[in-house]
Image (tube, rainbow, N blue to C red):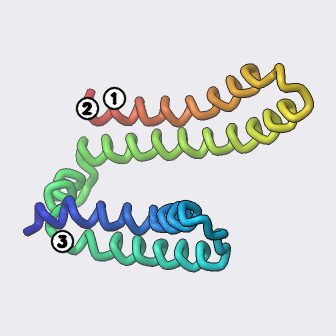
Amino acid sequence: MDKILFFILPLIALALIMSPIFVTLARKSKGKPTNAKRAVVTNIASFFGVLIMTTLLPFTTAFAETAEAVTNAAGMLSDAGMKYLAAAISTGAGSIAAGIAVGSAAPAAIGAISENEKVLSKALIFVALGEGVAIYGLLISILILFG
């Protein structure tokens, strides 16, 4: 039963997160205009659904082995715990840095493209370089965990 919960609960959480997109696509395919209020309410409901799932998930025994690996008998962080912490920091820092880079490069690229269409490829390179930072952070996390 715990193994089933281990796979089903994240899928339910993903479905709750993606529900505003499904609602919007369904309305567009029917030719109806999208309702902004409905999208906001759906997004808030999915947020609280995911919040409830993440608070209930640790009470299952699905992550018991991970919790034992993180701390040793003395309550100190073990080597596995330090690996998980380092992987989380590298992924988080890379994602935040990519968000900052894309947040400043993309509007500038859009402005440059609107003035001169010939700079499209050059502008997209700068936006892609910003996204590359997140991929590098994820790559470092993979190397830390499995290397």
Farthest residue to the front: give it: 31
Quick one: label 3, few (<14), some, or many (20+) residues within 10 Å? few
Q: Are marks 1 and 2 in contact (CB under 8 Å)?
A: yes
Of the pair 126 and 91, the residue shown nearer to us: 126
Q: Residues within 10 Å of mark 1 (few under 14, many from 20)?
A: few
Q: Quadrant of the N terminus?
A: bottom left
Left or right: 24 with respect to 140? right
Q: Hey, what amino acid is under mark 2?
A: Phe
SS at badge 2: helix
Q: Is residue 26 above or below residue 130?
A: below
Query: Residue shown at 26%/69% (left/top)?
Result: 58
Q: Which residue is mark 3?
A: 60
Of the image marks 3 and 1, the number of the one nearer the N terminus: 3
The type of residue carrying mark 3 is Thr
Q: Which residue is mark 2?
A: 146
Q: Quadrant of residue 71?
A: bottom left
Pointer 2 with pointer 3, Cβ within 8 A: no
Query: Which numbered disc, 2 or 3, marks the residue that appears first in the sequence?
Result: 3
Q: Residue at x 29, y 36 (%)?
A: 145
Residue 98 rendering spot, x and y as whole percentages: 61, 39
- At horizontal 37% and vertical 47% (from top left) the residue drawn is 85
Q: CA distance from mark 2 to mark 3?
A: 26 Å
Secondary structure category for the residue under label 3: loop
Front-lying residue, 37 or 13:
37
Q: Which residue is mark 1?
A: 143
